[in-house]
């Protein structure tokens, strides 16, 4: 299959491209390689993707002409759309930028897919659409009308645009709500990277709140399996959680990194930050049923793999 993957130089995108190439698909990666975090990390990700079936377009998903060219030249069978402004906290200070990339960029790709008759579209959404909750499992059937960050609102808007293209044009679209993804090549702005770096450097880590907040951390290898399974399933229109169904408190998370690094953390406590949700937990029964999705990597093993990668780079 010929698959156009946006955000190919990023964390999840590079893993998805690698897995597609490994199983014999042909991939066009699209990424503007922005400087939200060290571009060297993205360039290194692209080096891993060197393959006769991989080509790359250094372009912006908001650039209609560039996207038209990509679709015309590559003629993809499917799109996996992972490019985005991905951090929650910076979305509070740059809401317009998040709207531009995450909403208008998504619309640009959906329009290109429609005009080039690409009927298979996977959209990387987020658990953040569920808003602020303090318990229970997050189900795709739940109402998601109360996002608490511009980032979350743009992901919800992206899902809605996807539904429009399914409804009006019969496009097959699956929106995947990822739950806190971590693993090798992880983003430097996320807790696994920041905490590992600080602990190994003997620097204090900032823990927002008392450590009782909890998240459903999901290993990137499990996410990739879910993304590929959703591509193959080619479902007419679905929203699916890809999580781990196993929330871990921040304190447990820090203790697990301490074991993986063999060093104690110095903890500085600060108040919870605006936009951050206190708790996430994916109900993954729908993804299990429709995709056979079954995460296999626990936090201990996953963080050990992350720390190993971190130390090598
Ligand atoms: N990592 C997580 O925990 C997580 C959780 C939920 C949802 N997601 C979603 O998964 C997707 C991938 O996230 P990630 O963690 O790999 O982030 P990432 O920042 O590593 O990857 C995103 C990539 O998109 C590229 N990009 C950004 N704007 C672009 C534009 N205008 N044109 C072209 N490329 C552009 C960036 O350069 C980057 O390489 C995103 O859509 C994100 O919102 C991630």
Image (cartoon, rainbow, N blue to C red):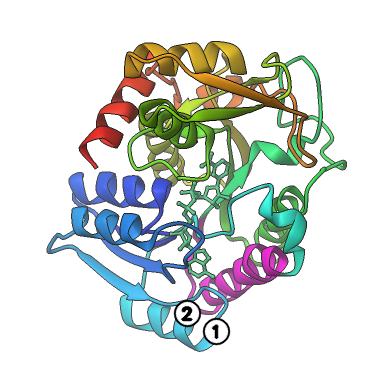
Residue that extends furthest to the right in the rendered view of this protein: 146
x and y percentages locating residue 162 in the rendered image: 66, 58
Between 66 and 198, the residue placed more toward the observer is: 198
Q: Which residue occupies the foreground of this view, 305 or 178?
A: 305
Asked whether, in this view, residue 234 is left or right of residue 85, the answer is: left
Q: Residue at x 40, y 52 (%)?
A: 13
The residue where tag 1 is placed is 64
Crowding at dot 1, Cα within 10 Å, few <14 / some 14-19 / many 20+, comes out as: some
> Alpha-carbon distance for marks 1 and 2?
5 Å
The structure residue drawn at horizontal position 20% and vertical position 58%, both measured from the top left corner, is 47
Residue positioned 82% across, 39% down in the render: 144
Q: Quadrant of residue 183?
A: top left
| Corner quadrant of residue 241 | top right
Vertical order, 4 against 311 (above or below): below
Left or right: residue 49 versus residue 216 is left
Residue located beneath label 2 in the image = 67
The answer to whether residue 99 is magenta is yes
Name the residue at 50% across, 88% down: 65
Q: Which residue is at the front of the view, 66 or 160?
A: 66
Dots 1, 2 in contact, CB < 8 A: yes
Residue 201 located within the stretch drawn in magenta: no
Q: Which residues are magenta?
A: 97-121
Residue 172 position, x and y percent, is 56, 54
Where disc 2 sits, the SS reads helix
């Amino acid at each position: 299959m010929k698959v156009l993957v946006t955000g190919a130089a990023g964390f999840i995108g590079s893993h998805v491209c690698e897995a597609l190439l490994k199983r014999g698909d042909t991939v066009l990666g699209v990424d503007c390689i922005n400087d939200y975090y060290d571009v060297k990390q993205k360039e290194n990700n692209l080096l891993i993707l060197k393959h006769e079936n991989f080509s790359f377009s250094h372009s912006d998903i908001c650039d209609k002409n560039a996207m038209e060219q990509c679709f015309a030249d590559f003629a993809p069978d499917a799109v996996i759309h992972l490019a985005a402004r991905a951090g929650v906290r910076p979305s509070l200070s740059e809401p317009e930028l998040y709207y531009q990339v995450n909403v208008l960029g998504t619309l640009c790709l959906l329009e290109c897919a429609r005009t080039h008759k690409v009927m298979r579209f996977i959209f990387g959404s987020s658990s953040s659409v569920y808003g602020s909750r303090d318990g229970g499992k997050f189900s795709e059937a739940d109402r998601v009308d109360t996002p608490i960050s511009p980032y979350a609102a743009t992901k919800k808007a992206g899902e809605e645009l996807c539904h429009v293209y399914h409804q009006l044009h019969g496009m097959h679209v699956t929106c995947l709500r990822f739950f806190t993804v971590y693993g090798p090549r992880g983003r430097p702005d996320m807790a696994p990277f920041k905490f590992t770096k600080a602990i190994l450097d003997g620097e204090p880590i900032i823990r927002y709140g008392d450590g009782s907040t909890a998240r459903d951390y999901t290993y990137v290898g499990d996410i990739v399996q879910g993304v590929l399974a959703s591509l193959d399933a080619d479902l007419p229109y679905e929203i699916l959680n890809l999580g781990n169904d196993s929330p871990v408190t921040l304190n447990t998370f820090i203790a697990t990194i301490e074991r993986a690094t063999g060093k104690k953390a110095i903890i500085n406590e600060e108040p919870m930050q605006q936009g951050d949700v206190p708790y996430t937990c994916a109900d993954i029964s729908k993804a299990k049923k429709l995709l056979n999705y079954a995460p296999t990597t626990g936090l201990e093993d996953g963080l050990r793999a992350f720390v190993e990668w971190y130390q090598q780079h």
